[in-house]
Amino acid sequence: MEQAIQQLSQMISEAGDIVFFGGAGVSTASGIPDFRSAHGIYSGAQGRSYEEMLSHGYFMRHEDVFWAFYKNVMLYPDAQPNAAHRALKRLEEQGKLSAILTQNIDGLHQLAGSSRVYELHGTVHRNYCMRCGEMVDLAYVAEAEGTPKCPVCGQRLKPDVVLYGENLDDDVVADALAAIRKCDLLIVGGTSLVVQPAAGMIMYRRPSCKLALINRDETPYDDHADLVIHHDLGAVLDAVIPGC
């Protein structure tokens, strides 16, 4: 482990443009569970899977049940950034980190102070009216009794997150790919790299770009990496990006 830490430290020292790509494992230390491993099947809806409950079709057909589920298991308004978020902020302050690409929707990177964050799957902090376009924040949704409605026209609100069956935002994808193609070190952490198309984006890096993978478990891309560390993400980043 010590040798891997030293190797990653050297890679960071030699890099001029670093991009971090993260998933659910970045936020588990903040009390936000990885719903695939922690929950599996939602027992309160006749055994329906998370994928079905969080699909666009289910949202459109069963608005009230969707919102009850979403508010109960997807919103963590009191969550705070952890060691991984803070270490990445320090790396940005050092002028090394140019962008964060995240599959998470919790907004914790921004709360930690990171400035260039591409949210591939959207964010719980924005919700919009499907009729008039009015935007409301997380607090409005979380505090609403039952199904939240647009405060302007009273119609259907939708979380600004990518539900199953929806496409990623083209502009966000374009910006994220541009960052990957430009960097000379791509650090991937806290993700199993199985959710497509986001996971496949790491293969768009230049041949000269080094790849470091930090995840507790193996990923389908381990063989493509220059360095693989199967350990706690926050502990690794804290060790290679120490605070003052």
Image: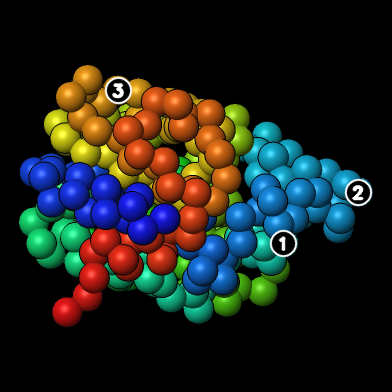
Q: Quadrant of residue 188?
A: top left
Residue at (86% x, 58% y) in the render: 44
CA separation, marks 3 and 1?
38 Å
Q: Which image quadrant: the C terminus? A: bottom left
Q: Look at mark 1 in the image and give the residue it sits on.
A: 68
In the rendered image, the residue lying farthest to the top is 207
CA separation, marks 3 and 2?
41 Å
Give the residue type that dot 2 points to. Answer: Gln
**Along the horizontal axis of the image, is 24 left or right of 55?**
left
Q: Look at mark 2 in the image and give the residue it sits on.
A: 46
Q: Which image quadrant: the N terminus? A: bottom left
CA separation, marks 1 and 2?
14 Å
Q: Percent x, y for residue 92? A: 16, 59
In the rendered image, the residue lying farthest to the front is 3
Q: Look at discs 3 and 1 and give the one toward the viewer.
A: 3
Q: Look at mark 3 in the image and give the residue it sits on.
A: 204
Q: Look at discs 3 and 2 and give the one toward the viewer.
A: 3
Q: Percent x, y for residue 115? A: 20, 59
In the displayed structure, 20 sits above or below 70; it is: above
In the displayed structure, 75 sits above or below 39; it is: below
| Front residue of this view, candidates 120 and 241 | 241
Q: Percent x, y for residue 5? A: 32, 55
Callouts 1 and 2 close, C-beta under 8 Å: no
Helix, strand or loop at label 3? It is: helix
Query: Within 10 Å of the Cα at label 3, are there few (<14), some (14-19), or many (20+) other Cα atoms?
Result: some
| Front residue of this view, candidates 186 and 30 | 186
In the displayed structure, 218 sits above or below 207; it is: below
Residue at (17% x, 35% y) in the render: 183
Give the residue type that dot 1 points to. Answer: Ala
